Image: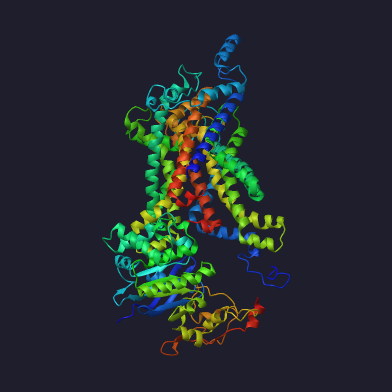
Amino acid sequence: MAFPKNLSPDGKRLPDLPIDPEQIEKGSSLWQDAWARLRKNKLALFSFWTLIVIAALCFAGPVFTPYSYVEQDLERTLQGPSWQHWFGTDDLGRDQLTRVLVGGRVSLTVGIIATCVSLLIGVTYGAAAAYAGGKAEAVMMRSVDILYAMPFTIFVILLMTIFERSLLLLFIAIGAVEWLTMARIVHGQVKSLKEQEFIEAAVSLGYGTRRILFRHLIPNVLGVVTVYATLTVPSVMLLESFLSFLGLGVQPPQPSWGSLIKLGADNIQLYPHLLVIPAFFFSLTLFCLNFLGDGLRDALDPKSSKD
Amino acid sequence: MPPLLEVRDLTTYFHTRNGVVRAVDGVSFSLNRGETLGIVGESGSGKSVTCYSMLGLIPMPPGRIEKGSAVFDGATDLLDCPPKVLQSIRGKRISMIFQDPMTSLNPYLRVSTQIMEPLFLHEKGIGKKEALERAIQSLREVGITEPERRVHFYPHEFSGGMRQRVMIAMAMITHPELLIADEPSTALDVTVQAQILELIKERQRANNSAVILITHDLGVVAGMCDRINVMYAGKIVESGTADDIFKRAAHPYTIALKRSIPSLGTKGKPLYTIPGMPPDLSQLIPGDAFALRKGIRSGGKYDHTPPPMVQVSDTHWVRDSDCELPSLEEVLDEC
Amino acid sequence: MFRFIFNRILQSVVVIFIVVTITFFMVRLAPGDPFSSERRIPDYIQQRILEHYGLDRPAVEQYWRYLQGAAPKRFRPDKLFTEDPLLNAFGIDLGPSYTSARTVNQIIAETFPVSFELGAWALLIAILFGVSAGMTASVFRNTALDYVPMSVAMAGICLPTFVMGPILALIFGVWLGWFNVSGWFVPADRVLPAVTLGLVYAAVIARITRGGMLEILSQDFIRTAQAKGVPYGKIIFKHTLRGGLLPVVTYMGPALAGVISGSFVVETIFQIPGLGRQFVQSAFNRDYFLVLGTVSVYAVLITLANLTVDIVQVILNPRLRFED
C-alpha cells in the first residue's frame, strides 16, 4: 500500500482512519460502483436510453423530414395526421412532426445550457461560501435564503415582458432562479465534508490544501452535483415551457414544446392531436429525466436511497 | 418451576440483496427469574439480533426467523405467537433499553407522554392522574431530581445520562419480569457508565427482575452478571458463570477478549488487541468461524465441520476449537 | 419564542419592501412606457398624459410617492367587506390602472377573491391527496400500495399544470362533457382548474410525505415504541406523523409560490377572471401600477405563508422552541 504507515514521526500509533484516503483517491471506483448500481435499476436505465433516443430524434430528425419548421402551406392548415404529415399540420400549415422535433431541440438545448449556467454559478458560490467560513459564509448563505423567499417566477415573467425577448435573456432569467438550490446543496455538502473525519485525517497527515480540494472534496461533491444537475434539467425545461406557454419564452417562428402545447391547448375542441403529441413528448422527457436523476441519486449516494 | 426464558436453536437470517446474512445461527440459552445474563461479543456477532428476534423487533423483510423457539414463563413461545399476545408482553413483562439514549426517546413527545404510555397500554383503566403519579415516582426512583417538574420536559432538555435514566424509568414502570439492556452504557461518558449500570442493578433488585445485558465490553459484565454467553459470528462460543469465564476461560476468543481488557497495573505495557476482523456473515461458514480470522493459527480440525459444544463442568460449556492466538509481539508487528 | 416571531415578521416586511422596490425599478427602467408602444399620439398629448400620471417626474420621486400610497395607514376590520377594502380598511392606495377605467385597488378587490378560492381548493386537494397517498405508501412500503401511488405521483410531477390543464379539459370537458372547458360561473367550474392546479403539488407532497415518514420510521425511537408494545396504528399516528409531516410543512411555502405561478397558466387556460391572468396581462400591457399592485399582493401572500410555516414548524418541533 502506498498509504503512509499509520505512525506519526515520533513513532506513536495514530488512530485508524475512518475511511482510507486511498479509497477516495481512486475516484474511478466510486463511478464504477455507481454505474454497476445504476445498471441494476431497470427504470433508470430505460429512462437513460429513452432520453438518448429522444435527443437523437430531436437533433438529427429534422434533417430527414422533407419540410422545414418555418415552411408554411396555407392551403393545408390544421390537418390531422396523414402520410404526408405524420403529426398533421399547425395553424399555418407547417409540418407538426418537424416542429415537434425542432421544439424538442430548443427545449433540450435551453434545459442543458441553462443548467450549466446555474451549475457554474451555484457550485462556485456554494463552494466559495463553505470554504470561506465565518462571517462571509453567513452573509453569503443568508442572502441566498432571502433570495429564496422572493417570488422568482414573477420576476422572470416581468423580465421577459419588459425587455426584448431573446434566448440569451431566457438563459439569464432561468439561470438566475435555478442556481440558488445548487448553491445551497453544494454549500451543505462541502461544509459537511469539511467537517468529516477523513478530511481531518488528510489534514493531519499533512496533505496540502489543493490536494485535499482536488483529490478529496471535489470527487465527493461531484456525485451530488451530478444528481442535482440531472434533476435541474427537467425543472429548467419546465420553466422554459411555462414561459413559452404564456408566450414569454422562445419567440415564433421558433417552436418549443411549451409553445406547441399552448397551440394545442387553444385548439383542443377540434384538433386534440396538436395538444396530445407535444404534451406526450414533453412529459416523457420529464419523466425520464426525473427517473434518471432518482436512479443516479440511489447509485451515487446509496445512503440517501429510500430503501 | 420452569425457567423464565428458554431459548432453543434461535436462528435469524437477513435476506439482503448481497446474499443471506446468517446473523444468529442456532443460539440456545435459558434464564431464571431474577438472574442476570450477559451476552458478550464484538459488533456484528449477533448479540443484539438475538434479543431483537425474541421481541419481534427485527425488520421483516429483510430479516427472517428461520427456526427455533423462545418460551417465556413456560407458556408462550415468543417466536410463534399471535402479534397481539407478543404486544401485550412487550413493555409489560419484558422491557428493553437501548444503546443510544439520544435517539431512543421520541423528540416530538413530552417525557411524561412517553413514560405513561406503557401504563395506558398495559394497565387498562388506569386514570391519567394515577399514571402521572406513577411516572413521577418512576423518575424519582431512577434519581432524577424535581421529577414533578421535569416529567413535562422534552427529551432534548435532558443530558445523555439523564435520558438513559428516563429510558430505565420507562422500562421499569410496569415492573417487568425481564429487562433487556442493549449496550446501555456504551454511548455514555465513562463517569456516567458506572452509575447507569449501578442503577440497572438497583432497579433489578427492587423489582426482582431478570436482566439480559448485551455488551461488547467484558469488563462491564464482570461485576454484574451471574452467567455469561460469549458470542462470535452468530454462535455462542462459550457459556458459563462469571467465574467460569473469568477464571477458567477455554475458548481462544474468550481468552483474547479477556486479554484485551485494559486494567490497572498494566500501565506502560502494550495492550493486547485481537487481530483481524470478524468474518463476513453473508458467506456460508461450514467450520470454525474463528479459525478464519486473520492472524489466527488453526490446526484445520474444523475447516469443514462445525465445532461441537463441549461440557466442561455443570455450568460451563465451550465450543471446541483448535485455534491458537498470536502472541503479543506478533500482534504488535502487524500494526 | 415571541422574539422569534417578532424577528420573522420584521424580516417579512423587509422582503416585501425589497420585492416592491425591485419590481418598481425593473418596470421603470425598462425601455418604453405604456403609452409609447401602441399607437402614435401627438407629442403634446403624450406629455399631458405623462404629467397626469406623474410619469415625468424623476424615478426616485415616483417611487417615494408610490410607497406613500401603498403603505398601510390604518386597520378597520369592519370595512373589510366594502367595495374597496384595501383603501377603506387599510388606507392603501395602489394607484390607477392605465389600461382600465378602474383603480388597481378595485381590480384587485374584484379578482383576488377568485384566485384565492381557486388556490385554496388547489392546496386542499394537494394536501389531502398528497398526505394520504404518501402515508399509505410509507406504511405499506415495497408493496403495490407503495408502488402504485408513487408511480402515479411521479407521473403527476411530470405533467405540469400547462399540460395537465388542457388534457383534463380535453378528457372531461370535450370528450366526456362533464364540465365546462372555460369560465367561472357555476360551482362545477371550480373542479377542473382546482384539480389541475392541485395535482402537481399533491404528487410532490405525496413523495415528501413518504420520505418524511420513512425517515422517522427508521429512527431508534420507533423501535423503543415497538418494544413498549405500542400497536402499529399508534406508532404511525402518535409517534411518526408529527415528525414525518414536518418536511411537508416546510414545503408549504414553495407550494404556495408554485400555486401562484400555476394560477397564471390555469386562469389563462380556463379563462378565469382572477388575479393571475390580470398580472400576466398587465405585464404584457406594461400597466405599471397594476403590475406593482399584483406583485405586492403576491409578495405579502408568500411572506405570510412563509411566516406561518415557520411558526407551525416551531410548534410541531419542540427542539426548535428553545433555539433562537
Q: Is residue B70 left or right of residue B301?
A: left
Task: Give the percent coordinates (x, y) of residue C236.
Answer: 37, 55
x, y percentage for residue B287? 49, 82
C40 lies above or below B140 = above
Residue B192 visible in this rendered orientation of the protein: yes
From the viewer's perspective, tell me whether residue B31 is left or right of residue A126: left
Quadrant of the image occupied by residue B86: bottom left
- Relative to the observer, which residue lies in front, A11 or C33? A11
- Farthest right residue in view: A9
Horizontal side of A179 relative to C321 (left or right) equals: right
Q: Tell me which residue sits at (29%, 67%) in the image.
A: B85
Q: Nearer the viewer, residue C147 or C114?
A: C114
Residue C101 % position (x, y): 46, 16
Count of marks placed on residues: 0
Which one is nearer the viewer's eye here, A178 or C112?
C112
Q: Position of residue A188 (x, y in %)?
A: 58, 51
